[in-house]
Image (spheres, rainbow, N blue to C red):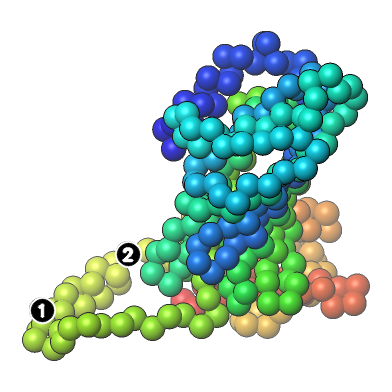
Amino acid sequence: MKRFITFVIFTLFLYPAVSAQIMRQLNVSVDLKEDSSSNLNISYRFTEEIKKIDFPFRGKISDLNFEKGKCEVKKDTENILHCEPPSPFMVGDITLFVWFKGTGLVERQGNTTHFSFDIPILWKTDRIFVTVKLPDGMFLSDRVLLPISPSGAEKKIEGKNIITSWSFANKNPGDVIPIRIYYESIFPQPQIEYFDYRWLFAPIFILIIGLIIIYKKLPKKTELVLSVLNEGERMIVDIIRKEGKERVDQRKIVSSSGFSKAKVSRIIHSLQSRGVVDVERVGRKNRVSLRKMMLKE
């Protein structure tokens, strides 16, 4: 990570020299696999002033392929995906396609898997589209408060896969888009024990009792969530909680809160992107309910 930051800082020093270079569009598509590898597809559409593209990649790159240009992997402070247009004399907008297999972006934490990918912005970029496809049978984890960031992601289901996507506009050199996703399997892997721990029953029992006592003194998860919400968001959550586990018509939330339809819509969208509520579209109506983590306590 330090080497990645060093690379971006070095790029910032070059900013006056590359300010005329414009990336029209950057598309990054990641297809996550069960073996913790990733298939990445990147396409660049850039102006003729850009003569080379050096994209730092934290993980290992293999099976590199490209089209309408030429690419190779260079070793510097970290792996660098180095690409150039097919000719330095091309004019107008140029589009270059790259696809490869990457490792080092996924970390397993028990039954939860953490995907982390920092996308550096090295040129003034008009539009950026990022798509991440989870492996078959995986879903966003409810073990963490924010299973996906940055906020504003669109989520859809295709077959057995959840696909998340973001769109950004008008990014400047030195900006970084940090993609983070926590996910887990619908069928968690059982924990395999290789030794007989029955002789540790007494100290483990004591430890569990101690943890229960500590847990009761800690603020509940719901309290932690409410502590980071603003006054309007807490009001909306309280209105929904009064309905128990039933989904609440969004129009009822508008009438109960006294807020405008637009304000309620913005607040619910913010709560949904942060994993606090679920929204179901039924005809022309939106029905809103709290996530499971808010109903357990």
Residue type marked 2: Leu
Residue type marked 1: Pro
Q: Residues within 10 Å of mark 2 (few under 14, many from 20)?
A: few
Q: Nearer the viewer, mark 1 or mark 2?
A: 1
Q: Residue 210: percent from the left, percent from the top? A: 18, 73
Identity of the residue drawn at 51% across and 37% down: 79
Q: Residue 57: percent from the left, percent from the top? A: 54, 40
- Could you tell which of marks 1 and 2 lies nearer the N-terminus? 1
Residue carrying label 2: 218
74 is higher (above) or lower (below) than 144: above
Helix, strand or loop at label 2? It is loop
* Residue 66 appearing in the image: yes
Identity of the residue drawn at 29% across and 67% down: 217
Q: Residues within 10 Å of mark 1 (few under 14, many from 20)?
A: few
Residue carrying label 1: 203
* Residue 153 appearing in the image: no
**Contact? badges 1 and 2 (CB < 8 Å):** no
Identity of the residue drawn at 44% across and 29% down: 77
